[in-house]
Image (cartoon, rainbow, N blue to C red):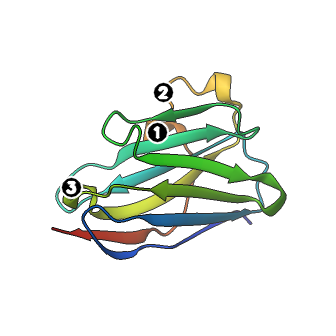
């Protein structure tokens, strides 16, 4: 049984930082990603990373502020979020695909990922 469990969300002031975690079990994944969805908006890709950790891709809106990383020994995915802005407020989801990095044509498309966590809320106050 595949399980993805996120944690680390919360309320933070603008300019602050949070680190999200996602523990994966039951899946030999090839690519993992973080997505977010704000009320009334579509789910958008934030960042993705290959199983080796050597390749990563970011949305323009979070480039240089967010860092995705992977601890393969712990099967845990992280998203370090710095310089948070009110517009970063959303439910954050981790997702996984069994396909290798080179087969994922659009690294930030939700359609490319088969498995999802339940989400963790991030709220940034101004």
Question: As rendered, which of 90 and 63 lies closer to the eye?
Answer: 63
Give how far apart the Cα atoms at labels 1 and 2 are.
9 Å
Q: Answer above or below: position of 61 versus 9.
A: above
The x, y position of residue 82, in whole percent, is 40, 56
Of labels 1 and 2, the one closer to you: 2
Residue drawn at x 46%, y 39% as measured from the top left:
111
10 Å crowding of disc 2: few (<14), some (14-19), many (20+): few
Question: As rendered, which of 67 and 76 lies closer to the eye?
Answer: 67
Labels 1 & 2 near each other (Cβ < 8 A): yes
Give the side of residue 24 with respect to residue 124, left or right.
right
Residue drawn at x 64%, y 31% as measured from the top left:
55
- Which element carries disc 2, helix, strand or loop? loop
The x, y position of residue 74, in whole percent, is 79, 63
| Residue at numbered disc 1 | 111
Question: As rendered, which of 100 and 16 lies closer to the eye?
Answer: 16
| Residue at numbered disc 3 | 87
| Residue at numbered disc 2 | 106
Q: Answer above or below: position of 31 versus 125.
A: above
Sequence-first disc among 3 and 1: 3
């Amino acid at each position: 049984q595949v399980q993805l469990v996120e944690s680390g969300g919360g309320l933070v002031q603008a300019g602050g930082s949070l680190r999200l975690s996602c523990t994966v079990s039951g899946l030999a994944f090839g690519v993992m990603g973080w997505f977010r969805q704000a009320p009334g908006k579509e789910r958008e890709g934030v960042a993705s990373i290959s199983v080796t950790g050597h390749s990563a891709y970011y949305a323009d809106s979070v480039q240089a502020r967010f860092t995705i990383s992977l601890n393969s020994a712990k099967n845990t995915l992280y998203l370090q979020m710095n310089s948070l802005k009110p517009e970063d407020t959303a439910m954050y989801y981790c997702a996984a695909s069994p396909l290798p990095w080179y087969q994922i044509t659009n690294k930030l498309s939700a359609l490319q990922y088969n498995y999802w966590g339940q989400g963790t809320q991030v709220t940034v106050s101004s």
